[in-house]
Image (cartoon, rainbow, N blue to C red):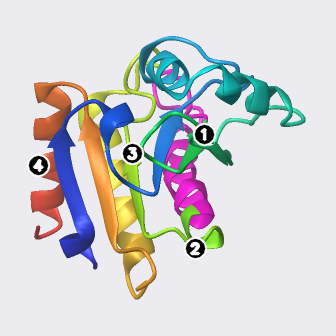
Amino acid sequence: MSINKIEIVQADITTLDVDAIVNAANETLLGGGGVDGAIHAAAGPELLSECKQIPGGCPTGEARITHGHNLRARYIIHTVGPVWQGGENNEEGLLAQCYRRSLGLVLGNNLKSVAFPAISTGAYRFPVEPAAHIAVSTTAAFLTGEDRIEKVVFCCFGEASTRAHEKALIGLGG
């Protein structure tokens, strides 16, 4: 596993100097609360204009890419995580798919670095510890044997999320 490429930070994702940041978006891609609202505000109104041009928005578990506009990151990868409904509706599989599809867009656009928020753990109520485990283990598995991605940052909003991601990484031997 390529856990040496994974970093965990507690910061504002809109300030990070990476090739792409991931937006925990809703299916319309037209902005919302939490990290989605913060990214739209920091990127500027051009982001909303670009998102309006994406036919059909973005279904849960999928990912779309736009320019970063006013952000330090050149691109924004928008992914729609699952709403937690007790764990009986493939929420874990859909969340893992968000990470894989986002990392696929990183590769497909020849990017070297990406930062993820804790997808689905805010308004979508996915429990933080299992979400962190899915995020870290799915990413580490994706990076195995993959040399083109140099750095993946898990950008956590609070202490509980940071600790959960660190625990997940330690569980993988990091």
Sequence-earlier tag: 1 or 3 = 1
Sequence-earlier tag: 1 or 4 = 1
In this picture, is 81 found above or below 173?
A: above
Label pair 1/3, CB-CB below 8 angstroms: no
Q: CA distance from mark 2 to mark 4?
A: 30 Å
Which kind of residue does numbered mark 2 sit on?
A: Asn
Sequence-earlier tag: 1 or 2 = 1
Residue for badge 4: 167
**Looking at the image, is mark 1 or mark 2 nearer the viewer?**
2
Label 3's element? strand
Foreground pick, 80 / 35:
35
Which kind of residue does numbered mark 3 sit on?
A: Phe
Q: CA distance from mark 1 to mark 2?
A: 17 Å
Label 2's element? loop
Foreground pick, 103 / 127:
103
Quarter of the picture containing the C terminus is bottom left
Label 4's element? helix
93 sits to left or right of 135: right
**Looking at the image, is mark 1 or mark 4 nearer the viewer?**
1
159 sits to left or right of 124: left
Label pair 3/4, CB-CB below 8 angstroms: no
Magenta span: 80-105
The disc label shown at residue 78, or none: 1
Q: CA distance from mark 1 to mark 3?
A: 10 Å
